[in-house]
Amino acid sequence: MSKGLFITGTGTDIGKTYVTALLIKSLRRKGYDVGYYKAAISGAPSVGASDAGYVNKTAHIGEDEDLLLSYLYDHAVSPHLAARWEKRPVEKEVILQDWQRVTAAYPYVTVEGSGGIICPIRDDEKAFFQLEDIVRWLKLPSLIVSPAGLGAINDAVLTAFYMKEKGLPVQGFIINHYTGSPMEQDNLRMIEKLSGKPILAVVADNDEVLDADADAIIRLYQ
Ligand SMILES: Nc1ncnc2c1ncn2[C@@H]1O[C@H](COP(=O)(O)OP(=O)(O)OP(=O)(O)O)[C@@H](O)[C@H]1O
Ligand SMILES: [Mg+2]
């Protein structure tokens, strides 16, 4: 039975892909056969140039591109809007089928979300669902990637509270763009105190390894 972990973030462009690549790279170095999957990517011209291609290369997964994601959209807007414009709605059956394929290939699969946790994936006359529904279909626990700086307390704690309200299990945070300044150190303390969730690792700009215990991180996959 394969295990999975969902990587969400406090917003778009906050480093989910960067952190996910580091995480998978570090786990693979320790001998864990960890794969990657993203249901929908918007704003990329090809798989190779997308989040999936970046992680595949950086984390040395070496997988066929078509196993890494289900939907690729050209327009850099929320997947539900890109899908409408490009007339290619996300189908639940396709996601579940692709999930079967990737979990058959890897004992551990890291799933990157699109945007933050509130992200509509499909909104048309036939169906409505959001990213959090995909997390539920795949029965995944989550990690939240959050920047370290000013505004992080609000964004990180709101994301954790929203997920708690929606019954989505959160394993903790990975803090990105960490410089270790006194304010950031206090942000980390406050995020843990107010959310009740642990900070599992911090990532500085241009880090090439994840400074965390791989055996502890792998136990977050369920
Ligand atoms: N720790 C870091 N060091 C250097 N560059 C970083 C770091 N974190 C993020 N970046 C850069 O910031 C940009 C946005 O990061 P990234 O693509 O990982 O965000 P994201 O949350 O995955 O975005 P999306 O919502 O589009 O999936 C990228 O150019 C990435 O290389
Ligand atoms: Mg990304």
Image (cartoon, rainbow, N blue to C red):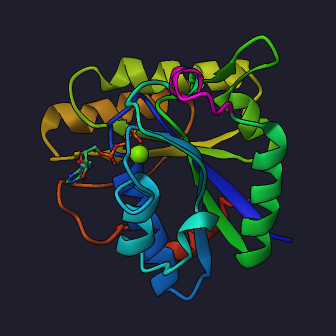
Q: Residue at x 71, y 18 (%)?
A: 165
Q: Residue at x 45, y 65 (%)?
A: 23
Q: Residue at x 70, y 46 (%)?
A: 141
Picture coordinates of residue 155, whole percent (x, y): 40, 21
Q: Residue furthest front?
A: 87
Q: Is residue 101 visible?
A: yes
Left or right relative to 221: residue 18: left
Question: Which residues fall within the magenta stretch?
Answer: 81-89
- The answer to which quarter of the image holds residue 3 is bottom right
Picture coordinates of residue 199, whole percent (x, y): 45, 46
Q: Residue at x 18, y 60 (%)?
A: 206
Which of 51 and 89 lies nearest the eye of the viewer?
89
Residue 59 lies, with reference to residue 96, above or below; the image says: below
Which of 32 and 114 lies nearest the eye of the viewer?
114
Q: Is residue 198 visible?
A: no
Picture coordinates of residue 189, whole percent (x, y): 36, 34
Residue 36 lies, with reference to residue 25, above or below; the image says: above
